[in-house]
Amino acid sequence: MADFLGTPFLWVVATIVLYGIAYWGYGKWIDRRVWRSDAKRTTPAHMYMDGVEYFPVSRYVLWGYQFKSVAALGPILGPFIGIKFGWLPALIWIIGGNFFIGWLQDYGAMMLSVRKEGRSFGPITYEFTGAKGRTNLLAFVLFYLIIISAAFIALIAVFWSKYPGTFIATVGIIFAGVLCGQLLYRVKMNVFAVTGIGLALVVLSIWIGVYTSAQWPSSFPTVLPLGDWTVPAWALLAVLILYAAAVLPTPLFVQPTNYLAFYPAYAAIILLFVAIACGAISGWHSLVSSSSSSKQLDIETDALPVGGGAMLSEGLLALVSLIAYMVLAPSFFAQGNYPSWVEGAIVLTSPFLGGRAAAGATLTVFFGLVLVIYALTVQALVTRFFRLVSAETWSEGRFRVFGNKHVATVVGLGIPWAFAVSGSWWALWLYFGGSNQLLAGLAIMLITIHLAKVRAPTRYSLIPAVFMIITTLAALAWQVYFFTKAVVDYLNGSSTGIFGNVRAPINKAPYALVALGINAVFVVIGAVLFLVGLSMAIRLFRSYLSSKAEARVKAPAAADGGTRER
């Protein structure tokens, strides 16, 4: 019986059934009874259509864009970390967290922004908590985006270096995305025809990547100033691509590229499903939903399939990632072998794709490319959001130069690049988990405040918000203690702790002071994240209580601002 309960097939079927209930049962009930979405209500995409940030998009294209914009390395690497404590706790969180919290945040953040005329969380927080609350949130988000960027830039560089051919395939997909954007928005070609052309170019890109993988990099001499295809050199290439993605108009680069990249990314999930016949909740998703997708939503009723549907789809990515790790021997998890997801995926799929000998090289490039896609396409949006938040934060005053889109983009990429190539990004990943989930809790509190103001039911979002905020603040406090202890132990004569989460060279002795400095910096970063997050949480809870009190004296309303049905 125990062996049967541990079979991947059983949990795939159970998860699909539960996610179906979450979407068609719980999700549609929330959409109909709490938010009361209305297809006839004008959305910000039509109100302020400018072809740059605001423009209506087909729900099918927007769903692909949303999925590829929110699904990053969290649901892939999260199970890698979580499975060390056993596969069952990770599985329960993937199912339960997504069912009760994950989709609710993504969908709710999108609807909140739509109801606030496309405004992002900065102006909404100002409305709910005042100027200090807005400043707190923006400061937290800036630190948070730096952490994400450092980890993702490092991982992109590692994947390009480890899996030859994936860089060429990545460039091919970017070119295909830009071309499809021109065909879709400038030539006005039919979306299905554009998608067909794009998919053909994606297949061609992967084929070229496989063909060149045997020759790379020996046949391609570097012209970069940072060495012969080292990780810093790869990271610099990633930074250059991300700079372009951050400053170019959304429909020219990010939106069509992310939409097209959805297909190989989701194809990997389907392949793993066939073979076996953070993915639960992420604060990053609320930023995408409120700052980007809400401005492209054609009609309000698209919010559930786009926001809720994409998040539940990401839960499936976390599920198949967990299963890809479950089929590997314990030795694959030694020494932080996070790219072992590719090996697990090959083990699962090669038997029905011609065997490892025949399909090994192709599958290695394909699944390695999928890892790069999940990181690069999301990091493009992270960089773009850093630029937008910097503009919102530094638009006035003596430091307004940091609000310039080019300066902000350089800062938002330069600092993370330094962290990435110094070997310190791995420690930042520990803070990423806590700050990411805390941002989710804060986002759900903003949603809850809005629902309280219009006298809509709030318990469905308030309980998840309280749970997320308390647990993540505790996690951040623990990490601060962890890094502080490493510094104190070093000063007392033990250097073991300072290398615990810093990727140092083999000869660690000359690197000890650098590692000490990195740990000390992380003490400060963690303390700032904790204090700013705590301050923001207190302000949001106060705003919620005052909103409930004010709403009691008003006429009963619903989330759409209309009178609630008796």
Image (cartoon, rainbow, N blue to C red):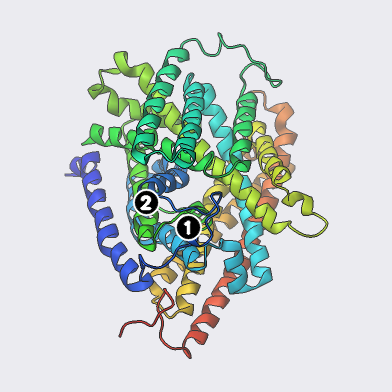
| 291 shown above or below 325 | below
Does residue 180 appear left or right of residue 394 in this picture?
A: left
Does residue 292 appear left or right of residue 92 in this picture?
A: right
Q: Which residue reaches farthest front?
A: 187
N-terminal-most mark, 2 or 1: 2
Q: Is residue 261 visible?
A: yes
Quarter of the image for residue 397 reads bottom right
Does residue 502 appear left or right of residue 283 in this picture?
A: right
The secondary structure type at the circle numbered 1 is helix
Residue 272 spot, x, y in % from top left: 29, 34
Q: Quadrant of the C terminus?
A: bottom left
The residue nearer to you, when weighing 147 against 261, is: 261
- Mark 2 near mark 1, Cβ–Cβ under 8 Å? no
Q: Mark 2: few, some, or many residues within 10 Å (few <14, many ≥20)?
A: some
The residue nearer to you, when weighing 10 against 108, is: 108
The residue nearer to you, when weighing 160 against 78, is: 160
Q: Which amino acid does the dot numbered 2 rest on?
A: Arg
Q: Residue at x 43, y 48 (%)?
A: 66
Q: Which amino acid does the dot numbered 1 rest on?
A: Ser
Instruction: Tell me how far mark 2 sits from mark 1, CA to CA.
Output: 12 Å
The secondary structure type at the circle numbered 2 is helix
Q: Residue at x 61, y 19 (%)?
A: 229
| 151 shown above or below 527 | above
Q: Is residue 493 visible?
A: no
Quarter of the image for residue 367 reads top left
Residue 374 spot, x, y in % from top left: 46, 37
For label 2, the residue is 59
Q: Which residue reaches farthest right?
A: 398
Q: Which residue reaches farthest left?
A: 1
The residue nearer to you, when weighing 118 against 72, is: 118
For label 1, the residue is 294
